Amino acid sequence: MEAIAGVDQKFPEVRGYFPSATRFADISGKPPAAPVYDGDKVIGYVFESVMVAPVPAYSGDPINILVAIDQTGKILGTKVLEQHEPILLVGIPVQRLYDFVERYVGHSVKDKIVVGGSDVPGTTKIDAISSATVTSMVVNETIMNAALEVAVSRHLVTGMPATENALATIRADYLKKANWQQLTGNGAFRQLNITRGTVIDAFKGQPESGLVDDPTAPSPGHENDTFIDLYYADITPPTVGRNLLGDATYKAMMQNLSPGDEAIAVVANGVYSYKGLGYVRGGIYDRLHIVQDSKLFLFKDTDYVALDNPELAGMPSFNENGIFILHHGQGFNAGGPWTLQLLVRRQIGPLKSIYSTFSGGYQIPADYVIQPKVNSSPIPDDAPLWVKVWYGKRFEIAVLVAGLLFLSLILIFQDWVVKRPKLLERVRVGFLIYTVVFIGWYGLAQLSVVNILTFVNAVIHGFHWSIFLMDPLIFILWTFVAVSLLLVGRGVYCGWLCPFGAMQVLINKVALKFKVPQLEPPPYVHERLWAIKYIILLFLFGLSLQSVGLSERFAEVEPFKTAVNLHFMRSWGFVLYAVILLVAAAFINKFFCRYICPLGAGLAVSGRWRLFEWLRRRKECGHPCQICANECEVRAISPLGPINYNECHYCLDCQVTYEDDHKCPPLVEHRKRKEKASRPLPTRVVTTDAQAERPR
C-alpha cells in the first residue's frame, strides 16, 4: 500500500507541515506538485524543487529541496533532499545548509528575498551561508522560483512570475569608431564605484574581522577612498568589442563564441578584487554574477577569458581586466535589462564570513541590437482568469482543434476511407501516435472518470462554467466527446482520442508484428467481464456523493495519471500497475479498456441515447458470416451479428471488411458471379473432314 500511497509516505515530515490534513495525494500536474486535503478541501501543495525549477549549483548539479506552501502562498516547510556541493565537504558543516533553507519558512512566494545584500526597501534580506555564498544564492533562486511557479499555476496568488524578454539580436553590421569617453557616455560601459565608507556603512552593526589588512573595517579619514571602481560592458556588439580589443583580437574572440553567446568585459581598480579565489577552490567566480528577470547567471573558470592590452582610445589603466562568457541556452537576453552583482566578503573567523551585495544595472544601447516586435496581449488585465489561460494556450488549442477537425472528416467520409484499407491503417496509426504524444504526454489532456464525477457533483451543488473552462484542452475534448456521444456513442473517444487506449493499440500492433500469441476468453466469459467496469463506475459514483476527494483517490484504478500526466515518473507501485496493464495489451488488445475502465463505462451509459448507427451491416452478418465478429479488436460484435455500440471503439475494421469483395462473403460471391458472367463464351471449330464438330 505504501507504494501507491500519497506523498506523505515518501516524505513523512510533510504531515508536520499540515497538522490538519486528512489526506496527501501524489505529485501530479504541471508543474508537478502534490495537493494536500482537509476533507475535500485543498489546503496546500508539496513539491520537489528539482521537478519544478532545477538550478545548477556550485557542483553543477541542482540542489533538490522539498517545499510546502499553503493556499495563500505562504511557505510552510522546506527540507534539503539531495545536494552535492563540494564547498560543504571542505570544513563547512552541511547543517548550515539545512538551517539556511529553514529561514524561508513563513515567507510568501511573492516576497523579494535578497541573499547577503544591503537592506533595500521592498526586499527581505537573508544572510548567506558563511563561505558558501554561491550555494546560498542558488538555494534562494531554487526555493522562490519553484514556489512561485507552483503557486501561480494553482492560482494561489495573483500575477505571474517574471518572464524573459523577447530575445534581441546583436547587430553584427553596426560599427562606429568610438573612444572611452563615448562608450561610457552612451552607457555601453557602466560604472559601479564603491568607496570604503559605503562598505563600512553596509557592514555597520556586524562583527569585525579583527584583521589588520581588512579593507571592510572602519578606517577614520579614509571613508572616501576607493574600495573598488568597476566598469562592465557587453562587448559582443562590434562598436564596443572592436574598439576595445582591436580587429584581430575581436575576430578571434567571436570565432570562439557560439551563436547566441555574449561576452561581458569587467575591469576594475581598488583594494578589492572582483575575482577573489573561489574559482581556484571550486571553479566558480563567487564574487561576481549577473541577475536577469530573477534568474541567476554564475561564471565558472571555463567562462573566463583574459583581457590583455585593451586598445580602446582614452581608456585608463586597470589592475584587473577580464572577459566572462554567457553561453547560449542559459536564457540570457542581451536586449533586456540585467544587473551585475558584486559580493563583498568580510571574514570574521577561520571558517566564517559575512557578505554584503552591491549592484549595478545595465541596458545595452538600443543602436547595438535589433529588438523583436513584441505584440501586446489583446486580453485586458481585468479579464477572467480562464480567458487568460485560453489565450496563453492558443497554440495547443489550435493543434487540438486541427486534430479534431481531421478526425471529423474521417468520420464524415468513412465510407470513402474504408474502401482504401492501406490508407486507413496509416492514418489510424498516425492519429494514435498524435493522441499519445500530443493529447497525452504534451497536452496532458487525458480524460478521466474524475471529470464525470466532478461534473455531476457540480450540477448537484452549484454549477459554474468558469471551473471547467480553466483547462481549455480538457474542455474542448469533453465538448467534442459530448457531441460524438449524442451522434454515434462512446466509440469515437475510446477508439481515437484516449491516450492510454492508443498506447494499448500501438503496443498490440507491435506484438502482432512479432507474432505474440493472442489470448481471447470464451464469448460467455468475455461478456460477463464487461460488467466489471460498470461495477467500478457505480462504486466510484457512490463514493463521490459522500466525498469527491475520496472518489478521486479510488479512481487511481485508472492508470492515466501515471502513464500519461506524469510520464511514469511516480511511485513504483503506480508504475508497476500501469506497466502490467500495457503488457497485458500485447496479449489481449485493450484489456483495460474492455473490462476495467470506469471512464469507458461512464461514456457507454451516456452514449446509449445515440441518434445514429453509421456502421453498416448485412443480413448475412452472423448468419452465417463471423469474420467481423472474430476480427473485432475489442470483440464488440455479437456472434449473432449486431454491433454492441456500448463496447464498440469505432476502429472501422468491420467497415473495411464490409467493403472488401475479397473478404466479405456476400461481396465475394457477387464478385465471382460477375467475373463468371464477364468471361467470353467458347467458339465452335469446324473440322476439315466435316464429320464432327467439337468445341475448341
Image (cartoon, rainbow, N blue to C red):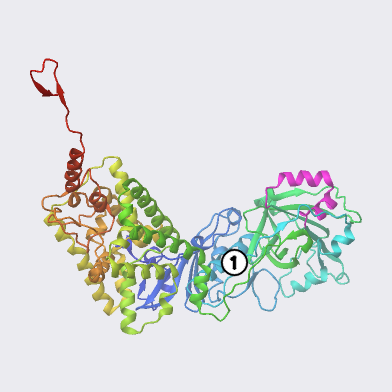
- Determine if residue 2 is in view: no
Tell me: 352 left or right of 14: right
Q: Is residue 512 left or right of residue 408?
A: left
Q: Secondary structure at mark 1?
A: helix
Please name whichever residue, 191 or 18, is drawn nearer the observer in this view of the structure.
Answer: 191
Quarter that holds the C terminus? top left
Q: Residue drawn 27% across and 79% down? A: 546
Camera-side residue: 285 or 483? 483
Is 608 drawn above or below residue 547 in the view shown?
A: above
Outermost residue to the front: 690
Q: Is residue 693 magenta?
A: no
Residue farthest along the bottom direction in this orientation: 462
| Whether residue 383 is visible | yes
Q: Quadrant of residue 167?
A: bottom right
- Mark 1 residue crowding within 10 angstroms, few (<14) / some (14–19) / many (20+): many
Residue assigned mark 1: 140
Q: Quadrant of residue 25?
A: bottom left
Query: Which region shows up in magenta?
Result: 234-260
Amino acid identity at mark 1: Asn
Majority secondary structure in the magenta region: helix
Residue 320, image x, y percentages: 81, 54
156 sits to left or right of 196 = left
Q: Could you tell me which quadrant the N terminus lies in? A: bottom left
Which of the 4 quarters of the picture holds residue 446? bottom left
The residue positioned farthest toward the right in the image shown: 314
